[in-house]
Image (tube, coloured by chain):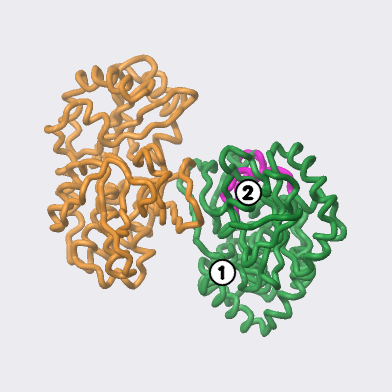
Chain colours: A orange, B green
Amino acid sequence: MTIQVFGHKSPDTDSTGSPIVWAWYLSEVKGTPAKPVLLGEPNTEAAFVLKHWELDKPEIISDVEAGAPVVIVDTNNPAELPDAINTADIRAIIDHHKLVGGLETKGPIDITVRPLACTATILYDLMGEAVAQAPRGIKGAMLSCILSDTLEFRSPTTTDHDRNVAQALATDLDVDMNALATRMFEAKSDVSAFSDAELLRMDSKEYTVAGKELRVSVLETTAPKVVLDRKDSLMASMVDVAKEDGADQVLLFVIDILKEEATLLIPNDLVKDMAEKSFGASVTGDTVVLPGIMSRKKQIIPSLTL
Amino acid sequence: MTIQVFGHKSPDTDSTGSPIVWAWYLSEVKGTPAKPVLLGEPNTEAAFVLKHWELDKPEIISDVEAGAPVVIVDTNNPAELPDAINTADIRAIIDHHKLVGGLETKGPIDITVRPLACTATILYDLMGEAVAQAPRGIKGAMLSCILSDTLEFRSPTTTDHDRNVAQALATDLDVDMNALATRMFEAKSDVSAFSDAELLRMDSKEYTVAGKELRVSVLETTAPKVVLDRKDSLMASMVDVAKEDGADQVLLFVIDILKEEATLLIPNDLVKDMAEKSFGASVTGDTVVLPGIMSRKKQIIPSLTL
């Protein structure tokens, strides 16, 4: 039975590219039939990456069948996976996020979690010498995943190892990383087609802080003005999104990739207090700039207090 | 701050030896101060292994302090770990059991789970060329862990890789594996000093099957008669142990390492029915022999039905 390889819901570049890379490795190198699938439409950057490297867009699935063999990449969080995930035959988990608990397996399986910026970096290590056999599109997907997750090495999640692997891939492919990253970030910044609710849910994770359910959304962009021009309707939309998703509050951090700062929208006093307590910010209007804040995982979540 | 490395409660050879091996690697190779600790008295086999390889018995701790840096080996189950485990600073998890969920980390960490028979085999792989630098006691501990967890390669959990690593270590150490395993199993079989309740809890894990809380205990021995001669008092003790530990039933499988079979005690109709349904056994007296059954993980747990 063909193994389905997938990342998290609302797939970004790493959750779109890493399943393609790993399914190639399982099928072509390990001789274990596997195919990449997606748990939703890829974001605009991931769609650009597929097109750029001439990769087929994987099939989108809405759930998994009981007993179906699957490999999970780029998450270990059941909330970001199909509802029936614990009924599937989970064969392996490869991830770079904190362990949240909740996934269960029937027997011992391969689990590899590393504190690196990108799943594709871990895949590169696990593949070892087989990387040399990978076609251009597979190597290109790995490079794009790393450029995406590290924001071209600007994110504080970046490790020397992510950088070295990206450099090795770029040299091998004879690709100008800066030019590729620029085109990727432009694609990600093109959010004109999305509704406010879609923007709020595009790159969003739920966390519980001091008993409050927070939906912590980020938008990484090279054109923050495009998003911030919509701040009034975005803040209005937060109320509905929070209600529909069972959250107490939606937070939106607009990450300026080039200036290396975040702008947090301040729709109410709860978020104002949170911004002041969490980041030592002094808030006067309905936005606040947080210099140097680029990473939800490394900077935002560890700081959030209420 | 020195990292504490530990395995599960009721430490067997793998949960005693692997912390010693990994703490050596972290301290001496990686330059990260670490020390092995135990979550209880090592079993008689593990005590023999410490003495045989002239290793110091690690300190026994009863809990961990909030924020203390720790590395967990040979389990990912919070029930087998200190109560305060999720308040500790978990730096890494290295294990070969199924994922049960429940452990949480504050950030992304190193997690390596592999479907191998023994944690020490994974440590050997992770250490790579550094194995060559390991002193005799460290290599000997790894070899003993593998012989213990594989029951000298008789257990169906054994993989070719476990076998190859053990063989490489034995060759390097110039050790007769069969002679070493025989002495280890003799040590494990010497259960005369233990009360019935201690025997029932010595190598025991809790599982929920069809809504019943089962304490599934195994005793691996080369002298099953010594244990089976005590079957009446062991079955009487099951009632108290189940009550004290909040379980519905204790199951005791006496594993005959040399004959490669298990004898299950049958204290009541619940266990009789379970033996018949789970293993297709035909039960007449107060014990039943299950030919070929050696592994709780691979054979007993996947079969248990009510």
Q: Which residue is tagged 2?
A: B274
Q: Position of residue B165 (x, y in %)?
A: 56, 75
Indicate whether residue B264 is drawn in magenta.
no
Magenta segment, which residues? B61-83
Q: Main secondary structure of the magenta part?
A: loop
User: Are the numbered discs 1 and 2 placed on the same chain, yes or no?
Assistant: yes
Q: Secondary structure at mark 2?
A: helix
Callout 2 environment at 10 Å: few (<14), some (14 to 19), or many (20+)? some
Nearer-the-camera pick, B146 or A159: B146
Q: Amino acid at mark 2?
A: Met
Nearer-the-camera pick, B51 or B159: B159
Q: Position of residue A110 (x, y in %)?
A: 45, 58
Q: Is residue B140 above or below residue A117?
A: below
Q: Position of residue A185 (x, y in %)?
A: 19, 45
Extreme residue in the right direction = B193
Q: Amino acid at mark 1?
A: Thr
Identify the image quadrant of the C terminus of chain B: top right
Q: Is residue B225 above or below residue A67?
A: below
Chain of the residue under label 1? B
Q: Residue at x 68, y 76 (%)?
A: B136
Q: From the viewer's perspective, is B114 left or right of B143?
A: left
Q: Which residue is tagged 1?
A: B158
Chain of the residue under label 2? B
| Tally of marks | 2
Q: CA distance from mark 1 to mark 2?
A: 27 Å
Q: Is residue B71 visible?
A: no
Q: Earlier in the sequence, mark 1 or mark 2?
A: 1
Nearest to viewer (mark 1 / mark 2): 2
Q: From the viewer's perspective, is B133 left or right of A283?
A: right
Q: Residue A201 sits in which quadrant?
A: top left
